[in-house]
Image (cartoon, rainbow, N blue to C red):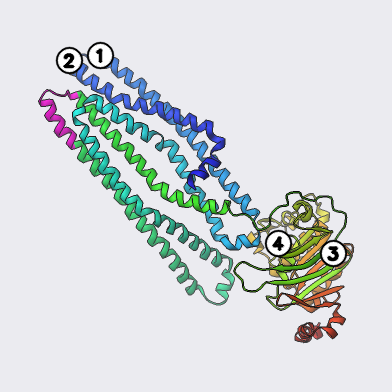
Amino acid sequence: MLISLLRRYLQPYKTALVIVVVLQFIGTLAALYLPTLNADIIDNGVAKADTGYILRIGSVMLAITLVQVICSVAAVYFGARSAMGFGRDTRAAVFHHVGSFSAREVTKFGAASLITRTTNDVQQVQMLVLLTCTMMVAAPIMCVGGIVMALRQDIGLAWLIVVSVTVLVASIAMIVSRMVPLFRKMQKRLDNVNRVLREQITGIRVVRAFVREPVERERFSFANADLTETSLKVGRLMALMFPIVMLVLNTSSVAVIWFGGQRIDAGQMQIGSLTAFLSYLVQILMSIMMATFMLVLIPRATVSAERLAEVLDTESSVVPPTHPVSDVVERGTVELRNAFVHYPGADDPVLCDISFRAVAGQTTAIIGSTGSGKTTLLSLVPRLFDATGGSVYVDGVDVREIDPDVLHARIGLVPQKAYLFTGTIASNLRYGRAEASDADLWEALRIAQADDFVAALAEGLEASVAQGGTNFSGGQRQRLAIARAVVRRPEIYLFDDSFSALDLATDARLRAALRPTTRGSTVLIVAQRVSSIIDADQILVLDGGVIVGTGTHDQLLESCPTYAEIVSSQLPAEVAA
């Protein structure tokens, strides 16, 4: 998965990566040549007291060092640009792909996990790319080149290289093999911490209202302790790496000096060659240590790549049409024909054999007990997910065949949870229609009965909106969400229990103001309150995912016991109104 992900998103940076390899190759060759020149100075300059030779070879060493520095800096520059570009492109790809998901796929992964994958997991793979460009490319060149150059100095000490490298690689491989499952656990536990934290921040008012702070602290502490415990296990294994590398490095250096000294004493080796051999051994082991850093990152990056690939390879259950229909003749028609919705793994369908037709100029209401499938039914119209059986038609065309842009341009949706985005009231309302003028916005606010409290704000339309609109009350958020849909002036209005937070008087004024605006449009309303739908042209009564009654308010009172029961349960409230 990791290789596949890198191949896919590093493709635009091939040229930069080739430049990095070339620069690292030149810089590493320069670093490998320096110990040989140093040995030459010792054997032919210092030993013979030839100052001119020392200065001449020293100048060459300075020039080679300058080349090495320039190549290293340039390699880091191009490597960093490639890594950052890779991270940007991968994040964008995940974000856009998640944007195509239906509610089913979002629920499958969970919002907290998707956030972690888009941020932390991408960062892990991006860090691997960065360190590969800056360290890993040079490591094998330095390791192989160091071995060759060391053998040129003295073959008699070659066995020390074999022993040192073997011990170091075996020790590191043992540690890394134990780290892979821990990294997988750590990412999952990071998901859990994000999920708990997100729930607590979002539901802070509920937590405080029910004095559940101690319980929530304990719940977060438990998730945090799980993550900490796994991180500590990884940290302990990582902490072993440096001592092992330094132990092998120092032991090898002592062994080289010991056995090299004996060879010098026997006249089989020169002092300069011993110095160079020692430098090459250090370079070899340091290159392995650089590779060790990568070996620490690769397992975690592999886990992250698997998680990213899982998202990117998940196809949305809402499949875009192969040959989208954009030429739609009818206007404002919504029709369901024997529609079924069955969630994977569920025993019974959420909706069963739903059929009805709504036309322009008509208000169709949907009412029923909690869990009867009202929101699911409404979600089929804008294709938030698809019916698993039957068909859904908008303006005479199956929603699975109509161009998504054409479909969404005809619909104004006010969701059950009135969500507002960070920004201003004006920017939120212009989600409905970007080119809307301030006059259009105020007219929409007037219809939604929101102009009074917006006008009372010092900044008016430019008043700031916190994330989710939490700086407004539930009723204010609902009215702003309704205004956002009204600004769009769509052919089809979908109100998903959008009046539940309004008092009866405001509800009545809002519905009265909406009538002239929606007169030529199709209106579908999901409601819990009978007062919100009593004047609807057509009321659908849902019970257990099945339509048990269709008609006007008066007709259903006589023919549908389920509707009559709902009305009777709300009768005191109706009388009070």
Determine whether the residue tagged by mark 1 lies in a helix, strand or loop: helix
Closer mark to the observer between disc 3 and disc 2: 3
Does the CB distance between marks 2 and 1 fall below 8 Å? yes
At x 80%, y 72%, the residue is 365
* Residue 386: mark in rendering: 4
Q: Earlier in the sequence, mark 3 or mark 1?
A: 1
Is residue 422 in view from this perspective?
yes
Determine whether the residue tagged by mark 2 lies in a helix, strand or loop: loop
Considering every residue shown, the one lying at the far left of the view is 266
Eyeballing the image, is 194 above or below 129? below
Write down the region rendered in magenta. Answer: 254-271
Q: Which residue bears the numbered disc 3?
A: 522
Q: Which residue bears the numbered disc 1?
A: 53
Quadrant containing the C terminus in the rendered view:
bottom right
Residue 458: which quarter of the image? Answer: bottom right
- Of residue 186 and residue 74, the one placed in the foreground of this image is 186
Q: Earlier in the sequence, mark 4 or mark 2?
A: 2
Rounded to the nearest whole Å, what is the CA distance between mark 1 and mark 4? 82 Å
Closer mark to the observer between disc 3 and disc 1: 3
- Dot 2, how many residues are within 10 Å of its Cα: few (below 14), some (14-19), or many (20+)? few
- Dot 3, how many residues are within 10 Å of its Cα: few (below 14), some (14-19), or many (20+)? many
Rounded to the nearest whole Å, what is the CA distance between mark 3 and mark 4? 21 Å
At x 40%, y 37%, the residue is 135
